[in-house]
Structure formats: structure tokens, C-alpha cells
Amino acid sequence: MSFIGTTRKGAAYAPGWFLANNQDCTRETRQIGQAGAETGPDGSKYVKMGTVWPTNDAAAEGIVYEDVDVATGDMPGSVVTRGEVYEDRLAAELAEAAKTALEAKGFTFRKAPKATRPY
């Protein structure tokens, strides 16, 4: 089950925050494993949005679309399998082998634009 945590403190981002174009991407349901999950101070376990799935190496197939709660075991979650991604908004630095594998699957990567003040 995917979720946006309410008990964790810190910034909350909309699902797909790392996507340059949320409309022009492909998402598919995949089994998200507990391996590589973060454990919160309250004991919760979750895989962060923007995590390369299943691993950040040549076996990369996609990027986790939103935080996935894996406290009770492996869970289904949404994984982006093609799209334009802001590389600097991913959960961890993208390994070169993972980047190459994802580009071969239809991903493009770029830097996020600097935020501007609305006033």
C-alpha cells in the first residue's frame, strides 16, 4: 500500500515530485521489497519515493513513484517505468550503471530548475 506519511516529520512531497512531466510517463504496479527500506523513528518501514527499483545498479527497471509502507512485508506499489526525471530529486544519487539501464528503457534525465519565488 502506498502512502504519504502523516507521522513522519519533515517535508512532504506530492507523488512523482521527481518527474519533469507527470502526464507523459508510464507507471506500473510492482512488488516493493523491504530490503533497502528506511526505518522511521516510530519503527515504521518505508521505501522512499524516487528510489531506483529494484536496485540502483545495472538491474534497474524503474523508479518508485510514491512512498510505500513495507512495515508488514513486501507490498505492491507504483513504479515509473518510462519518463523524464529530475535526476537531482531522486532519493539517492543515481549510479551510472542504473542510469544507463534506465535510459535504455525510455528514461531521460535532467537537472531540476531552480525554484523561483512567486513574488
Image: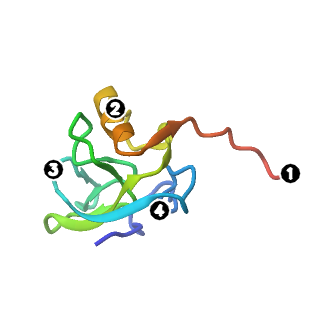
Residue highlighted by disc 4: 15
The structure residue drawn at horizontal position 47% and vertical position 62%, both measured from the top left corner, is 15
CB of mark 3 within 8 Å of CB of mark 4?
Answer: no
In what element is the residue under mark 1?
loop
Question: What's the distance in space between the residues labelled 2 and 1, CA to CA?
Answer: 40 Å
Q: Residue at x 81, y 52 (%)?
A: 118
Q: What whole-number distance in Å separates the C-alpha atoms at marks 4 and 1?
A: 26 Å
Q: Report the residue marked by disc 3.
A: 35
Q: Position of residue 4 (x, y in %)?
A: 41, 67
Residue at horizontal 68 percent and vertical 38 percent from the top: 114
Earlier residue among tags 3 and 2:
3
Q: Nearer the viewer, mark 3 or mark 2?
A: 2
Q: CA distance from mark 3 to mark 2?
A: 23 Å
Cα distance between the residues tagged 1 and 3: 44 Å
Find residue 46 and report its image quarter. Answer: bottom left
Write down the residue under mark 1: 119
Give the answer, above or below, for where 78 lies relative to 114: below
Q: Earlier in the sequence, mark 3 or mark 4?
A: 4
Q: Mark 3 or mark 1, which is nearer the start of the sequence?
A: 3
